[in-house]
Amino acid sequence: MSKFSLITKGLLKENPTFVLVLGMCPTLATTTSAMNGLEMGLATMFVLILSNIVISLIAPVVPDKVHIPVYIVVIATFVTVLQLVMQAYTPGAFKTLGLFIPLIVVNCIILGRAEAFAGKNSVWDSALDGIGIGIGFTLSLTVIGIVREILGSGAVFGWKFISGDGILAFVMAPGAFIVLGYLMVLFNKIAKK
Amino acid sequence: MAAKSTLTNMVLCLFGVCFVCAALLGAVFVVTKAPIEEAAAAEARASIAKVLPAGGEISAEMPSDAEGIGGYFVQTSDGAVTAYAVKSVAGGFGGPLALMVGVLPDGTVFNTSVLSHSETPGLGAKCTEEGSRFREQWKGFSGALSVKKDGGDVDAITASTITSRAYTKAVAQAVALVKGMSGGSAVHSATATHEPAQKTSVDGTAAAPKTKEDQL
Amino acid sequence: MEYLLIIISAIFVNNIVLAQFLGICPFLGVSNKLSTASGMSLAVCFVITLATVVTYLLNKYLLVPFGLSFLQTIAFILVIAALVQMVEIVLKKVSPSLYQALGIFLPLITTNCAVLGVAITVVTKEFTFGGESHLLGLGEATVYAFATSLGYGLAMILFAGIREHLALNDVPKAFRGLPIALISVGIMALAFLGFSGIV
């Protein structure tokens, strides 16, 4: 697999949201607006890249029986680092994303990639994989966020183009599921071509 | 590819990883401690400035045992108290509704802003919309502190009575606190002295004229 | 009275899956058959309640008094992972039939965001009852965790029933599988929105 395709596969063939269907919880909860989706995607990508790198570095010396708890400790450490850094330097985003920042620890994408890829590949490849999947995840979240924001608030990235409210159901729970469902159909149609 | 799963290996590995991670976290914690406190302080300062008249100096946070009050700040100008900023909490629709209420010493509300809420988007959450009818009425409010439905002077948000009631209650708590202070001899800061010209109303609610006409 | 409010709020008003978006991955993955859905709900109920109690105590008596709150995430997830391991071992010895019935679901619960989510919510979020808000005590936290997992089970079982019917229907090809499932959940969530305002 060429190095470039390692990055691009996260966009289409192995898109974590629409193809692998991983990391659903933050996908549904944090896409109430385009900006929120973007922030969540970037936060997750940060942890994914770093944990992929570290795990592929230490995988050769980790005994098989304890590899899951060890991976979890590594991932949890980077999530906590992210938490502290966000709390200090981006308090607005920290407040908006709230509970879902610590929940990055149990985001199936990160542990999944650690198991499936980082544990068995070189550091450079693992980093690229992290970047690819991370970009795919961020883009998916941002797109969902854009759709929900347009339909639900009549705005994009905070820039309102109608006065008053949109269809509020879209920034609330039902809208998340419905938008994701329809976008999945759209994605599958596009990806098949 | 992985090392052998002997007991020593496993224990060593776990300990090693935990040790390194703990060290890293400790370091990051120490580095970010000051910025985190600074960010919180900046946020607090901004939320206070929003609800007070410009200028003057703001005291440190004063504690309070009053119901629903998280604490308050005193704004002084040339040694005289010009306003109070009170953190007040009431139970809203989806969770606690926390407000910063700027109150003049005579009990008139200068302005309000929302610190945190769990209200429904499009309904109760409208209480965060600056410039809306609901929010504007609070600027200089000195009427009866309950919603019109309950016989007061507060114009509620359409279809969000519970949120409106909670908002009103939080403001009422703040006003009550200030009235309790201005009337009494409570010492709240070393520099505060009451100007003799500042009258404190004995019964600020019923007698005060409405300052905002109903927008119907 | 407060306990009743907690229970109704956790099951209907703030349903963990349909309103809080926690536990979605297993929710979508396991709910295509009623039997697997029930098995998973049982396992989740057990783990969430137990994990919440342990993490609550850990937080109250170890993390907070020593100023170690920043280690909350890492401590909680390790407790949950260890707990799930222990439950597996104990269950295998004590009730092999139940262990068989739960099968693969048990280890998967470690990565179920609902467990970590509830554990963190319980120690950080303030709850409002009749105008007063405060953090939960241990008893209230346990009831909340248990009720939350009941809400999870309810949503899963309802959904499994719907999915079994969907499988027998003529769904357009592009929508088959997850997309139509997601849209159905969306409509379910819309229905559950009607519960808001009860407490």
Image (cartoon, rainbow, N blue to C red):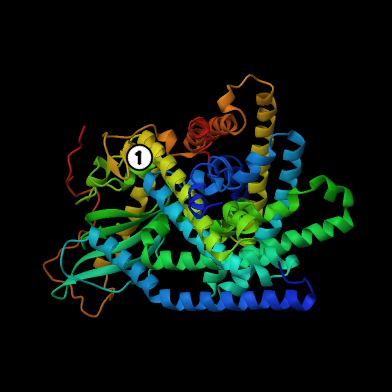
Q: Which residue is the site of mark 1?
A: B150
Q: How many marks?
A: 1
Identify which amino acid the numbered label 1 is placed on.
Asp
Residue A45 on image: x %, y %? 48, 56
- Chain at tag 1: B
Q: Is residue B141 above or below residue A178?
A: below
In the visual, does B115 lie left or right of B209? right
Residue at the outermost front position: A2
Label 1: state its secondary structure.
helix
Question: What percent of the width, then of the height, locates residue C43?
Answer: 74, 49
Q: Residues within 10 Å of mark 1 (few under 14, many from 20)?
A: few
**Visible residue check, residue C48:** no
In the image as oriented, which residue stretches furthest toward the left?
A: B197
Q: On the rendered structure, is A145 left or right of B178?
A: right
Against A75, residue B27 (above or below) is below
Q: Is residue A75 visible?
A: yes
Write the residue at 38% across / 68% down.
B64
Q: Nearer the viewer, residue C132 or C10?
A: C10
Question: Given the current orientation, which residue lies at the most extreme top position?
Answer: C170
- Residue at 69% from the left image edge and 70% from the top image edge: A62
Which residue does the image show at 60% across and 65% down from the upper left? A56
